């Protein structure tokens, strides 16, 4: 059997099993088989991600069959289809190569950005946030395409070094923090020991002040480990509670006594106020002394009422003291004699001025009379005042 080509007739094979028509049909069927195979390969190239290498291998296999000319049909047309398909595959290969190159550049840029961010995070003190971000960067790295081995290894080395640097700094930080918290725990244990030793004290003022100092020291000490801090605070607070509860009980009892003392002192103040106004100084002093003895025996009153109740008592004491002072002045012989002498002197001066004024006026010397009368008026005022003072001594 022969087939006509552009280069002339070619032998496609021989047929001995039947008629020439049957032979022709047989070799035509082989041609149709090649057509089907080329159709399938074209479809695979168009619709699947068949690699360029596999496609070229398949094209080469079909081209060998077409070139062998073991079929009857338009073999040249099949060759042209294979040529066109080769061109399509080559174009696809170039596109994929360009896509891979672009993807590689993008992956490189992305990885370089990840490395830069990781290196910046390596110096961060935001331990939790930076640690979470570095873990996220690792996940992002895993999702990126690989680069050429050298570039990929270099970038990964920098990335890994940044993570390691951060991890070392974080470990050192928390190791230091652990040491600091352990020191804080020891300091607070000492504060607790002192607080517990003070819990039975009855020196209320000094001990309460020391507890305030201990609280200030506690706050300044910082925090221990989380699992120890709560227990330490519970023990520290319990020691204080023992003391302050005992103090509160004592103060409550004392407050009750002081309120009772206030009631008693109010009664004594009312009794003392009945001595006013003073009419009998001696009797008032005796009565006030008796009330004062009972007053002093009573004891303390509540602080907020102290000024008011003592003010009432002091007012009565001042009134008695002033009455005694007035009585002493009235009965003092020396003072009375001085007052009487001064009164006599003033009386003589007034009488003398009066006579001189009358004489001047009788003589018609009006100016001198008026001058003497003015001086007389002044001396008369002094005499009136002296007479009033003398009257206070009982005449």
Image: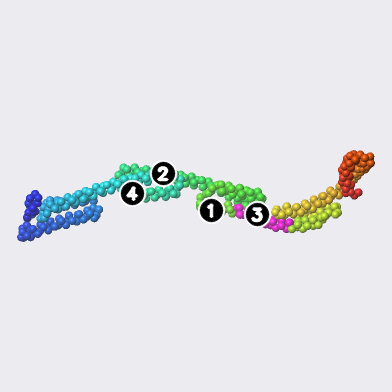
Q: Is residue 241 covered in magenta?
A: yes
Q: Which residues are magenta?
A: 239-262
- Image point 23% across, 53% down: which residue? 50
Q: Which label lies toward us, 2 or 1?
A: 2
Helix, strand or loop for disc 2: helix
Residue 41: give x, y in percent of width and height.
19, 54
Q: Residues within 10 Å of mark 3 (few under 14, many from 20)?
A: some
Q: Read off the residue under disc 3.
A: 247
Residue 179 percent across, percent down from the top left = 50, 45
Front in this rendered view, residue 116 or 293: 116
- Residue 353: percent from the left, percent from the top? 91, 41
Q: Is residue 20 left or right of residue 282?
A: left
- Which residue corresponds to mark 1? 230
How many C-alpha atoms fall within 10 Å of the one at disc 4: few (<14), some, or many (≥20)?
Answer: some
Q: Residue at x 77, y 51 (%)?
A: 314
The residue lying at 56 percent from left, 54 percent from top is 234
Asked if the residue at tag 3 contacts the one at tag 4, i.e. Cβ–Cβ closer than 8 Å, the answer is: no
Task: Find disc 2 in the rendering and name its residue.
Answer: 120
* Left or right: 133, with 366 as reference point: left
């Amino acid at each position: 059997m022969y087939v006509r080509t552009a280069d002339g007739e070619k032998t496609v094979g021989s047929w001995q099993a039947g008629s020439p028509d049957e032979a022709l049909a047989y070799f035509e069927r082989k041609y149709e088989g090649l057509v089907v195979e080329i159709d399938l390969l074209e479809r695979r190239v168009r619709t699947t991600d068949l690699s360029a290498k596999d496609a070229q291998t398949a094209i080469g296999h079909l081209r060998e069959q077409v070139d062998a000319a073991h079929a009857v049909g338009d073999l040249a047309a099949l060759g042209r289809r294979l040529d066109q398909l080769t061109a399509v595959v080559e174009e696809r290969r170039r596109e994929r190569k360009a896509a891979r190159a672009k993807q590689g550049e993008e992956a490189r840029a992305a990885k370089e950005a990840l490395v830069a961010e990781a290196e910046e995070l390596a110096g961060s003190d935001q331990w939790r946030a930076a640690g979470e971000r570095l873990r996220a960067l690792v996940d992002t790295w895993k999702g990126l395409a690989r680069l050429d081995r050298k570039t990929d290894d270099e970038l990964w080395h920098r990335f890994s070094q940044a993570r390691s640097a951060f991890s070392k700094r974080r470990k050192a930080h928390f190791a230091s923090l652990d040491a600091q918290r352990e020191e804080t725990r020891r300091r607070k244990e000492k504060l607790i020991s002192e607080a517990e030793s003070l819990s039975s004290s009855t020196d209320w003022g000094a001990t309460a002040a020391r507890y305030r100092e201990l609280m200030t020291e506690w706050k300044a000490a910082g925090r221990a480990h989380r699992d120890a801090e709560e227990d330490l605070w519970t023990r520290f607070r319990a020691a204080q509670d023992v003391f302050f509860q005992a103090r509160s009980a004592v103060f409550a009892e004392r407050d009750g006594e002081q309120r009772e003392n206030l009631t008693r002192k109010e009664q004594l103040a009312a009794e003392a106020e009945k001595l006013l106004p003073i009419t009998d100084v001696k009797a008032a002093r005796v009565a006030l002394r008796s009330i004062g003895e009972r007053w002093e025996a009573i004891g303390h009153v509540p602080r907020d009422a102290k000024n008011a109740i003592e003010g009432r008592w002091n007012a009565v004491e001042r009134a008695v003291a002033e009455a005694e002072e007035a009585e002493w002045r009235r009965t003092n012989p020396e003072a009375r004699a001085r007052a009487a002498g001064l009164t006599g002197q003033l009386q003589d001066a007034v009488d003398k001025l009066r006579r001189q004024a009358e004489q001047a006026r009788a003589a018609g010397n009006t100016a001198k009379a008026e001058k003497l009368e003015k001086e007389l008026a002044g001396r008369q005022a002094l005499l009136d005042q002296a007479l009033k003072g003398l009257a206070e001594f009982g005449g």
